[in-house]
Image (cartoon, helix red, strand yellow):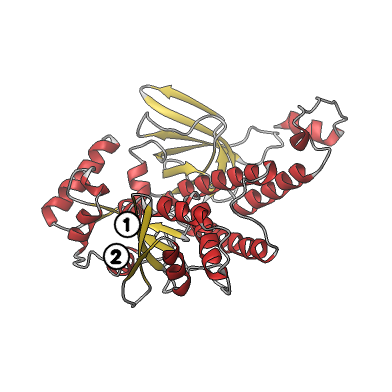
Amino acid sequence: MSVEWFDLAQRLYAAETRSPVARLTHTTFVPSTAALAVRAVARGGSVTVAVAGFEGREERTRDVDALGLLAAHGGTIVGRCDPAPLLTDDTGTLPALVTLARAHAHHPDPQVAGAAAMVAWWADRADHPGTSAVVNLVAASSARYVLGTTPEAERSATTWRQWLGISDDSVIGLHEWAAKISGGPLLPLLEPIHEDDRYSWDRALSAATAGHDWSRPDNTASAAMGLRTRCDAADLKAAALLDDPLWRQRAVHTGHVAVGVASVTPPPIRSRRRNASLAVTCERLDSRLRVGSEVTGWMGTPADKPFERFCVEVTSAHVVEGKLVLHLGSVGAHAPAPGARVCLMPQPPSPQTMRAGRGRYWRLYRARRSWLSTGQTPVAARREVPLDVLIAGAED
């Protein structure tokens, strides 16, 4: 079965039951009672904004008064300890708000200027997949559920309201919508992105206190770090989806998850290697696990993910008698039994390693004589390799 047939089967089941079918058992964002539901429309050089807080009423105004309205509802960087997440149901609201914020970035009223800085922070976090600071409810709903309609119809907020049973099409109804799709625990690997939201907010507060002008273009170091954090967030979001059992069952048909039968080869006699070598004969040929890939696996099915997992590297891949065989090298703890059914998927990245890498990256950009800050290609240089490292490499 291809992933297209898998998706079609879910859509047909949703159409038959007249109920959304879950793609994920986890939620993709952290719900908050401090969230602001906002809808902005730019027309004829003017921006009209509608705002509603949690369990509040809708208020509507335009242009500079709209920034004051955001500030009155907590959408400001002035006098706030915790950020207010943004809820919206279209792709035009945030660009309209950014246009408005740039036009009044240096407004003499500190509340208006603070709301403009808040919009800039929203725009920055919206570029990070997996963030909880900005939630496009249409995109979040599509990530978690499948409807019994065409894929094009799922891009409409009206379609989602009909299927989720939301009769209020004002911004007040966005809070009800968010509550309906945010049940369940957060995807585990999205927690570091949620922590990065907080870290980014603290930096924005510090920058505002120091009088930093957010409307000026970033310098080279800040722009490079922004790109790095966005790439790290995208990698974490992709790995986080594979942490969900429903998504792993779909990923079998995309090749990101491989299922097969394990065969174990004991180490050679008188060899210093103590661990057995593992090979997996896959049920499908379309695996995306390539030679050199770090994978994690366990005995069981994609719906399972026990604590006892092994981590190993794919050393070679061959097609034997019409079946793909992945050789995984030596496995230590939690090695599967011969003939056991095994599930493999890419090993998720380490958030701690990512943060450490970003720290080194930032220090290199800030250093005056660094090859990153000067733009000069580093010169290759030889160095002595310790003997024990050479011996260990020869043994492997």
Q: How many marks?
A: 2
From the image, state whether disc 1 or disc 2 is nearer to you.
1
The residue at which mark 2 appears reads as: 177
Q: Is residue 202 above or below residue 359?
A: below
Q: Residues within 10 Å of mark 2 (few under 14, many from 20)?
A: many
Percent x, y for residue 363?
Answer: 76, 47
The structure residue drawn at horizontal position 57% and vertical position 69%, both measured from the top left corner, is 110
The residue that appears at 37% across and 42% down in the rendered structure is: 251
* Horizontal relation, residue 249 to residue 95: left or right: left
Whole-percent x, y for residue 361 in the image: 71, 44
- Residue sitting at x 64%, y 54%: 352
Identify the secondary structure beneath mark 1: loop
Answer with left or right where residue 149 lies relative to residue 24. left
Q: Are marks 1 and 2 in contact (CB under 8 Å)?
A: yes
Residue type at the position of mark 2: Trp
Res. 290 visible in picture: yes
Q: Is residue 140 left or right of residue 349?
A: left
Q: Is residue 304 visible?
A: no
Q: Callout 1: few (<14), some (14-19), or many (20+) C-alpha neighbours within 10 Å?
A: many
Q: Position of residue 181 (x, y in %)?
A: 32, 63
In this rendering, the answer to whether 296 lies above or below 140 is: above
Q: Nearer the viewer, residue 41 or 343?
A: 41
Find residue 89 and name its label.
Answer: 1
**Amino acid type at image mark 1:** Asp
Badge 1 or badge 2: first in the primary sequence: 1
Q: Could you tell me how far apart the alpha carbons at marks 1 and 2 are, in whole angstroms?
A: 10 Å
Residue 205 at x, y percent in the picture: 62, 65
- Quadrant containing the C terminus in the rendered view: top right
